[in-house]
Structure formats: C-alpha cells, structure tokens
Amino acid sequence: MATILIVEDDEGARILTEANLKRFYNIETAKNGKEALALIYDKHVDLILSDIMMPEMDGYEMAKALRESGNDTPIIFMTAKQSTEDKIEGFSSGVDDYVVKPIDYSELLWRIKAVLRRYQISEARKIKLGDFSVDSESYTAEYKGEKIDLTRKEFDLLFKLLSYPNRIFTKNQLLDDVWGISTPSGDDTIKVHVSKLRNKLQKVTEFDIVSVKGIGYKAVIGEGV
C-alpha cells in the first residue's frame, strides 16, 4: 500500500483528509513544510498532498527544497489559490498536480491514482526482470530457474529497492521501512545486508544495487531488461 504524506496546518482539514484517504493508503501527516521535510528524511513517502499557505515553510518553499535536493517524490497541492499565476508558480517549484479547495474527495482519489500511476509506484507482489524474479507472497527469489536463498530482511530490502527502480532511498528510510528501527548502528546494518545481497546476486545482470554517496541506495535496472 502506497504511503501519502498530508501537509496541512489546519487541523480540521488535515483530519478530514486523512479520514477520506486512510482506507486506501498509509498516511503520514505534518503541519507545515518544515515538518514535512524532516519526516521525509526519516520515512519513505510515495506522494505528498500539501496545502500551500502554511507557517514556517509554505508549500512552494517545501517543493523547491525537495526538488533542489534531488528528491522527485510527486506532489499534489490542495489550495484555494487557482489563478494562472498561482499555478505557474506551483509548477515552476516542481508540483505535479493541483486540487482546488473545498476538496472533492472523489476527484482527489482519482488524481492521486493518476499521479502514482505516472510515477509507476509499485504495489505488485511479484517482480520479474528478465531471468530474475522475486515473489513477496512466498518470499522467494529465482534466477534462471534456480532459487537464491535470502534471509527475510535481505528479501525485504531487495524487494523495496526493486519496487521503485532508480529511486534513491536514504539509510534512515530503509531502516524504517525494512527494520522499523533507527539506531546508532543503523548504517552498519544497511551496509552488511547490501554487501550480502551483492554477493548472492553477483551472477544477476538484470540490475545493480548502487550506493549513492552520503545518501543511501537505489536499484538500477539494466538496459537489456
């Protein structure tokens, strides 16, 4: 299930939006852009649903900060600001779509699905890349018909990376999503598991697990896949 971050300073609006979406998505919340940026660093988010006018850091500033840092998480603005100039400013800051307040939640759900589909957010239980496949129902990995023995955490880490090819995950995001922890030894935990995965998958040419210096890891799919 995809995770959506609702960024809204109005508590009533935030609660109402969460109530309308939580049947379909995992929900995280923040009161302004500053809180949102801090949360995104620690947790994986598939889509950001944000108000524009907020204290401390507004939606425009948040979107610009994310894009300038290389973060391409899709953003939908919820706003009463609907002039052409407002929309130009929003799209210039890196926003993907708009929904106008008062919110029509049927329309919002449709727009969320469209943006997630555009970004190919994966909810698949099975992933197949050439001769390599992983199945999250049976927790199995195979290459050219031969099973690859992976521990549960190795499998979860690999499946997470392959579900979002080319997306960079910070070490904190992987710790939170795969282990559900954040500890001083967290970096070593990630390094050890990535090293073991690379060793077990050294014959696999369909993808690579790439280290992004100072940030984290991503799965890069081979050109022939």
Image (spheres, grey):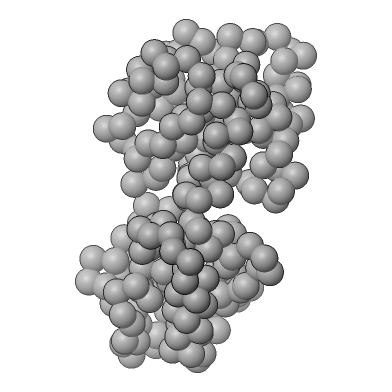
Residue 26 point in image, percent of width and height: 35, 40
In this view, the residue in front, 82 or 183, is 183
Q: Residue at x 39, y 88 (%)?
A: 144
In this view, the residue in front, 86 or 191, is 191
Q: Is residue 99 left or right of residue 178?
A: right
Q: Is residue 122 left or right of residue 147?
A: right
Where 191 falls versus 59 (above or below)?
A: below
Residue 181 point in image, percent of width and height: 38, 60
For residue 114, say whether it is visible.
no
Residue 101 point in image, percent of width and height: 51, 10
- Residue 54, by quadrant, is top right
For residue 84, say whether it is visible.
yes
Q: Residue at x 36, y 64 (%)?
A: 179
Where 47 falls versus 70 (above or below)?
A: above
In this view, the residue in front, 65 or 48, is 65
Q: Is residue 171 left or right of residue 157?
A: right
Extreme front residue here? 184
Q: Is residue 73 left or right of residue 213?
A: left
In this view, the residue in front, 153 or 125, is 153
Where 216 falls versus 194 (above or below)?
A: above
Residue 206 point in image, percent of width and height: 53, 78
| Tag count | 0
Q: Residue at x 55, y 59 (%)?
A: 169
Extreme left residue here? 138
* Quadrant of image for the C terminus: bottom right
Q: Residue at x 52, y 71 (%)?
A: 187
